[in-house]
Amino acid sequence: MTSDETVPRARTDVAKALLGQATYRSLGEQRLSPAEERFERGRRTTGLWLAPLVTAAFLVLPLDMPPSQQTLAGILLGVIVMWVTEPVPIPVGGLIGVAAIVLFGVVPADEALEPFGSTTIFTFIGAFILAQAMLKHGVARRFAFFILSLPGVGGSTFRLITAFGLITCVLSAFVSNTATVAMLLPTALGMLTVIAKMLQDRGMVAEDFDPARLRVGAALVLMLAYGASVGGLLTPVGSPPNLIGRGLIEEATGERISFAQWMLTALPLCALMFVVLVVVLLLLNKPEIRRIEGVEEYIRHERAELGSMSRAEKNTLLAFGVTVALWILPGIVALAAGTDSPVYETFSGRLNEGIVAVLGASLLFLLPTHWGRRETTLNWSDAARIDWGTILLFGTGIIFGSLLEDTGLAKTIGNEASGALGLSSLFAITAFAVVLAIVISETTSNTASAAVVVPIIIPIAVAAGVDPFVPALAATFAASFGFMLPVSTPQNAIAYGSGVVPITTMIRSGFGFDIFGAILIILGLPLMVALTGIGG
């Protein structure tokens, strides 16, 4: 008698395996193998000595370039090493770099810190506060269940995964990509639990199977992570790289990109990217079953638990609606009166997106939920929970981007790269911009990728006699890619941290989507720019 015959296999408790924790599991909260622990310790320890070593080595090189450019380049290389190895949190690495810029005399302190007062920073703050209200009061969750309750959506794995991706795309166009994925992940795991139990009850899996290793689960969770990156491209405020890239493009070319212009250009590309995403994920992670039962009941139960819309939810929707309407209004005026009209100049000047975001967020502290107790939709302790680390990282990224331009380092790099690589056509420079941005975003933050790549691409295009608008915008879009590794984006880290997506599955799926996404940007973006006239 074998051991398999004497020891019965324990039946997997699916609910405990998938829903044992109230929220997603971050990388630090997972049980790492000894090999993984050694790798993490080694990676962080390496950063402690490698970052200053790289900076020091570059500073002593006998290069034919102005001292300020060489110093800035050395410090930036050290910061990039810190961003990749994470000996300190990524935002702190950026702050260390800013301090080094001043200490080494690249620019005075006031000049270095000036970007922290930009209106783009306030756009971030306002948008994050609005997103915090949507998450706190369940507006985003209610919207998700509304879409999933549409007839037929919950009856097949294909429609379920596609619908979940659409929800993520729409929400992440206005709400932080990371917050969107973190908010929807428990719902995805709830639906995966229903599917896993059904597979178990039908005898389609072993009694002691691991529900976290189902292909349908990997497809569902990866759709959340990747769908957020695609949806984040839809609006200027959808993702930090969008705001960084747009600001750098406007500064370099003098062409303003309105909210409406951005959406008109991005919408067809995002739609095509989403179709490709569905195909790639479902081909590489083919669900174990096509028809499913029980998910529709789960959705109905969850919607019933939400109850009727509260006053706080209505107030949040009002503040959100006012903000989006004011963001779009200058674009509507431009279509009606033209961008050269005094009316458009008045609207675009006064309805600055940073001011509008702050105004919309302020409504949350004015709209009451209980007037007798003077309670409003949001209080300051709620607002203080927004992702300040991303705001700091964004500010430091903008600082490095602007200094690359101000010191002439970006132009130097552009001229050297243009000569060495023979980049002379719009297509070649655009392709180079996309590939460089994707490669960098795989190993560091999307924000850092945009802040580093866009200022390099603009002078390369100028040196080649090419309009830099399309290559710079292509680099901005491509900076939001990077789907192969958990460190590529926070939403990738959340997906991997769920325990449902093996690293090999993420690499395989992410590599496929990287390739197709790069092709779409290289071929599709110049066409959309020509059709919409953006930047012209």
Image (spheres, grey):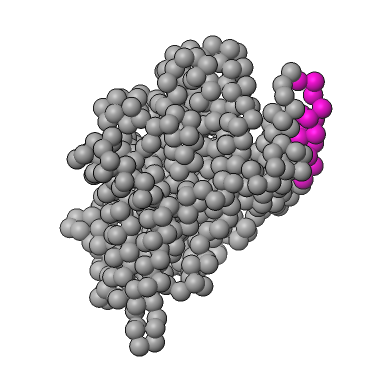
Quadrant showing the C terminus: top left
Measured as percent of width and height from the top left, residue 453 is found at 54, 31
Point 28% across, 70% down: residue = 314
Q: As rendered, which of 26 and 506 lies closer to the eye?
A: 26
Quadrant showing the N terminus: bottom right
**Taking 104 as reference, is 169 above or below it?**
below
Q: What are the residue bounds of the magenta stretch?
A: 47-63
Residue 46 seen anywhere in this rendered image of the structure: no
Residue 470 seen anywhere in this rendered image of the structure: yes
Measured as percent of width and height from the top left, residue 461 is found at 49, 20
Measured as percent of width and height from the top left, residue 426 is found at 42, 17
**Taking 92 as reference, is 253 above or below it?**
above
For this orientation, the residue located farthest to the bottom is: 372
231 relative to 290 in the view: left or right: right
Point 72% across, 21% down: residue = 65
Picture quadrant of residue 343: top left
319 relative to 1 in the view: left or right: left
Point 52% across, 41% down: residue = 446
83 relative to 503 in the view: left or right: right
Q: State yes or no: residue 489 in magenta.
A: no
* Count of marks overlaid on the render: 0
**Taking 293 as reference, is 327 above or below it?**
above
Instruction: State whether the magenta stretch is mostly helix, strand or loop.
Output: helix
For this orientation, the residue located farthest to the left is: 151
Measured as percent of width and height from the top left, residue 212 is found at 47, 56
Q: As rendered, which of 264 and 31 lies closer to the eye?
A: 264
Point 53% across, 58% down: residue = 387
Q: As rendered, which of 305 and 457 lies closer to the eye?
A: 457
Q: State yes or no: residue 56 in magenta.
A: yes
